[in-house]
Structure formats: C-alpha cells, structure tokens
Amino acid sequence: MLQAPTTLPETAPTSIHYHKNGGLYYAVISDIHLGHNKNPARRIVANLFKALPDNAETASLDIIFLAGDVFDDVLLFNDEDIFDIKSWVRELLYLCKKYNIELVVLEGTPGHDRKQSQYFVMENDINQIGAKLRYVTELAIEYFEHLDIHVLFVPDELAGGPEATLRSVKDLMRAKGLEKVDHAIMHGLFKFQLPNHVDNVATHDAEEYLQLVKHNIFIGHDHTYKQFDRIYVQGSFDRLGQGYETPKGHMRAKHQPDGSWEIRFIENEGAMRFVTMNAMGKTLEETLALAKATVVGLPDDSHIRVRADSNHPIFTNMDSLLRIDPFVKWTKDPQRDKDKALAPLVETHTKYVPITITVGNIAGLILEKIANEGATGAIMDASIELLEELFPTTRRVEHGNNS
C-alpha cells in the first residue's frame, strides 16, 4: 500500500492484464477543464483519447469515474471547443457501451461545471447509445448491483459546508443500513491538501471519511497529485497554467477478490507544457540566447513565462522572442523589489487615507503610479508628453511648481 503523500504511485508492468470477472478495475479522471482559455479542448481531447483508447486494457475496465470539473466555464454553442468536446463525449459513450463499462460523471465546482455535464445524458439518450451512465449532481450513495459495491459521491460546495455534508453522509448511510461504503468519489478539499499556514478554508475531515469508507477515496479539485493513507488526489488531467510542472494524468485502481488492491498513476505524457524562463540578471543578448535554448524540444502551443527585472529590455523587445519561435505563447513576468512594493500596503492596511483627485493633481498622481511600477526614464518622458496634452499643468506638477 502506498503511503508517501507527495510521491506518485509506481506504474505497474505493462504485462499485467486485468479481467472483469472476479475483481474490480476502475479509472478516475478529474479536473479536465474543457473550454479552458490556456489549453484548448482539441489538445485535451486528443490526450483523453490516448488515455482511454479502444483496446483490451480499456475494455477490462468496470467503471470510469469523471470526478468533477469536466468543464472550465460556461460554453456557447458557437465556441470553437464545442465540436471537439461533443466528439469526445460521443466516442466515450460508444466505448463504454461497446465494452459494458459504467460511466459515472460527478458534478464538480459549480463555478466550473455549471451543470454542463448533463450533455452526457442528452448525447446518450438522443443518439440511443445505451451506455450505462450515471450523472451525479447531489450527495448520493449509488449501488452497483452487478459489482455488489456501494459508492459514496460528494460533489463540491454542498449547502452547509463540510461539517453539514459529513452529517448528511452519516444520515444517508444509516438510512441505507450501511456501516461503511466500499469506495468514495469526491470533489473538494481535505485539510492535508493545504499548506500548514492556511487555516481559513473549509475542508473535509480525512479521518472521518477513512472510517466511513472501506477501500479507497478519490477526490478532485486540487490540480496536484497528493496522497494521505487511502485518500488519493489524482490532480488535473492536463496542465492549465504556470507552476504545475509535475506529471499529469489519471488513476487506475484494481481490487482483487482476496482483498488486495493496487493503485496506478497513468501519466498524460502529452500534457501542455508551461515553462518559466529565468532571465534575472541577464543581458538582452544572454536572454535571447536562453530563449533559443528553452524552446528546443517544446511542442507547439507551449507557454513560456519570461521572468526578469521589471525594467529589463526584453519586455520592450518581445517581438524578438516571436521571431525565435512564433508557435510558442510568450508572456511577461516582470519582477520588482517586493519589499518596497509591499511596504505601503502594510502601512495603509489598517488606516485608509482618502485621496482627492483634482485637475491640478491628477497628472502628478499618474506619474507617481507609473514611477512606482518601475518605468524607465524614457517611458516617464513619453508619459509627461502625453499628459501635457491632456492636462496643461503637467510640466509644472512634475517640477513641483504650483504657480
């Protein structure tokens, strides 16, 4: 059994083949975020097809759980991602029908899914696909008769928060005459997922749920893989932003009739790349040389964040980066003196001092703001010229002469 809370499970040998008769084999995928503005659905869908191909390994699955946040935000019918999403949903349903795989879709964070996963139900019904599909939008305990298992489902942000949710779970178990459920699929947070200094976030109680669940708990919402005892945070299926360079993918769980079990992490090797290029202290020429080295081997559409001092010339020469690789998305990450930047925030945090803006002082306030943002002398001069056209007193304000 795996215990390390920050270590990914070892991948099982490829020679292992699972069989539906006599055991339980299921996949858990969460936080797909279709419709994300930094990772188009066409890329994510291509990786989903690779994760669940039409082959013997997929055919041996009993259940596929989509543990919340299938969608990232509300999508309109004319959105460019819609065709790819519809194609994947349809093919997944046909795949599940072909191999008698149960497909369970859990509603995730309301601000992301927004009940759009009902499209799975519509597609299955309208096209008469006939896949075994369950779309879970409320707290529920579902019984899978052919597998003789009870599975607890806990969507995100239920009314009353985690404490009320736990009471409802226990009430539901009593009503069904259950001391324990076999497995749990959730969307939300346990306290172990948060840094020690974060204590103002409502979280589920890991020890309570471990007492209520006989086997494993899988939970979505957190995009980074974590583990605590029998609780697995599978993380997001693909990368969606900077700072998530750890492996992405989904989980597979196999339970044998003798009670033994195995957990595997299946990496999404085609996950979007988000890279930080650190040009702090480098000249423009050194930065461009670093950019050429950074793009080597990166797939098209990768994201590179350029980190440098706020007044670094690279930020006024971003076109040079596009000439190095026009198929990479370059973004700026200017760094300033954080101590100086934070000082006025701390000073005025408990005492608000109102500022009266007038025709006579507006130019000075704007110039002060620009200067605090790290503007160069050339930018300041250009700003003064522009402001002088709008406010004739700009020069006098700049030089401190109010006459």
Image: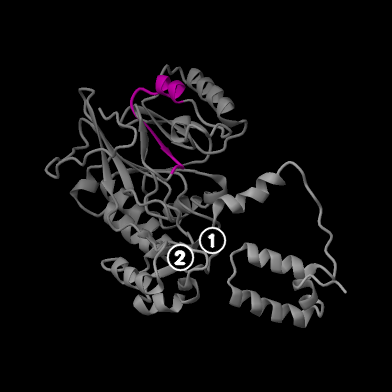
* Number of residues whose C-alpha sits closer than 10 Å to that of mark 1, classed few (under 14), some (14–19) or many (20 or more): some
**Mark 1 = which residue?**
75
Label 2 with label 1: CB-CB less than 8 Å: yes
- Residue nearest the viewer, comparing 53 with 358: 358
Q: Is residue 214 magenta?
A: yes
Amino acid marked by disc 2: Asp
Tell me which residue sits at (85%, 71%) in the image: 402
**SS of the residue under disc 1:** loop
- Residue nearest the viewer, comparing 351 with 123: 351
Amino acid marked by disc 1: Leu
Lateral position of residue 210 relative to residue 346, left or right:
left
Lateral position of residue 317 relative to residue 377, left or right:
left
**Mark 2 = which residue?**
81
- Find the distance from the CA under tag 2 to the CA under tag 1: 8 Å
Tell me which residue sits at (42%, 46%) in the image: 223
Image location (x, y in percent) of residue 336: 54, 58
Residue 40 makes an appearance in the image:
no
Tell me which residue sits at (47%, 35%) in the image: 195
- Residue nearest the viewer, comparing 85 with 162: 162
Image location (x, y in percent) of residue 143: 40, 30
* Number of residues whose C-alpha sits closer than 10 Å to that of mark 2, classed few (under 14), some (14–19) or many (20 or more): some
Image location (x, y in percent) of residue 235: 39, 44
Specify the segment rendered in magenta. Answer: 206-222
Image location (x, y in percent) of residue 1: 25, 27
Tell me which residue sits at (48%, 30%) in the image: 191
